[in-house]
Image (tube, rainbow, N blue to C red):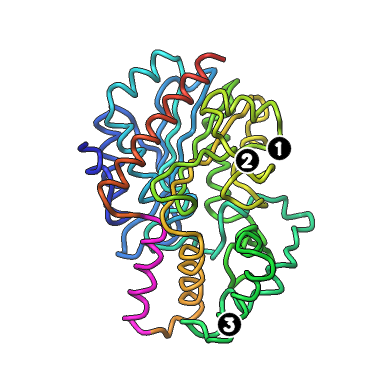
Amino acid sequence: MTETIHFSQSYAEARSKFVAAVDAAGLDVESHPHPMLGRDGEALAMDVVLEGPRDARALLVISSACHGVEGYCGSGVQNVLLHDPAWHGAVKAAGVAVLYIHALNPYGFSWWRRTTHENVDLNRNFHDFSRPLPTNPAYDEIAALVVPPTWPPSNEVNAAIAAFIATRGERALQSAISGGQYDHPQGVFYGGRNPTWSHVTLRQVLQRHATRCRRLGWIDLHTGLGPSGHGERIFACRDDAAALLRARAWWGAGVTSIYDGSSSSALLSGLMWLAAYEECPQAEYTGIAMEYGTLPVMDVLNALRADQWLENHPEASAEQRRAIKQQLRDAFYTDTDVWKQRIVLQGVEAAHQAVRGLGAG
């Protein structure tokens, strides 16, 4: 397979490849500039491309880099699709439009962070901030252990984490840490106290492109959970039985759900795709998060803990900074041809399944 050439080693390279793929497909890029600069001084943007008629009755969103550094995977899948004549033919034959959103969180993509420049997890940030925010007492209990004063953690911290797992289980630790929290701005999986730039910009994109369709599908590309290279199709809608039936009709009976505990993901708050209901109420919405596995869950959580410690300690040595940043990227991007080939096969399949589902409605 030659598809691995569409993956990249930096945000700037990924964006350049995306723009080139769009040009080769005869499409146009709509760029939403980000207020910050990238790690190498490059401009950052959420880049948006519409393929098909603006008034199409069915629209498929394919988005990458909700969690910044996870964009290395998602961008590669988007670029493969844009270079694939069979894909474009299937889209046209089905009468479906496709909205590619490249780099929902370009800052995190460039700087090898999972968070936005506000240190917010974009997929915990979609709340009505005029109302009380969710609480997470389990995170409150272990916040000082999750991001400790020193890195590597002390023996005492490691022992306390091990005791938590021994008494409550690894799944309980994952849920406490990753479910979302709103009271520790220097912690992990922080959902923020206001809408982030990416949050506001995504809503603008949906308002511009997704308010005419009658059927709306969404594949949001993620990494970091599950067996290496396996693309788990996680139901990404409200807890709605009819929508889950549609998702399984499109993407197979293996679609998992955070609501019934079948997913590798914990039950989460402030999810991004809730915006589909709020900005596109005219449409019947069906979506999944395509979650590609990388490393064991504790390795991924520890990489995130280290990266947040580093964010909180800018005085860290250059050597430690390099090691932690590489550890983080490795947790969300397996930079091998074998892994990328598996990602492409599953991503392309899921995209075709969505087009067939939307076209048949």
Closer-to-camera residue (346/43): 346
Q: Which residue is at a point 37% across and 18% down the rendered structure image?
A: 90
Between circles 1 and 3, the one closer to the viewer is 3
Q: Which residue is mark 3?
A: 157
Q: Which residue type carries mark 1? A: Asp
Q: Which residue is mark 2?
A: 257
Disc assigned to residue 239: 1
Is residue 326 a member of the stretch shown in magenta?
Answer: yes
Q: How many marks?
A: 3
Disc assigned to residue 77: none
Q: Which residue is at a point 27% across and 52% down the rendered structure image?
A: 336
Query: Mark 3 or mark 2, which has the lower sequence index?
Result: 3
Q: Are marks 2 and 1 in contact (CB under 8 Å)?
A: yes
Between circles 2 and 1, the one closer to the viewer is 2
Q: Which residue is at a point 46% across and 24% down the rendered structure image?
A: 353
Which quadrant, please, contains the N terminus? top left
Q: In terms of secondary structure, where does tag 1 sit? A: loop
Q: In terms of secondary structure, where does tag 2 sit? A: loop
Please identify the quarter of the rendering in which residue 195 is found. bottom right
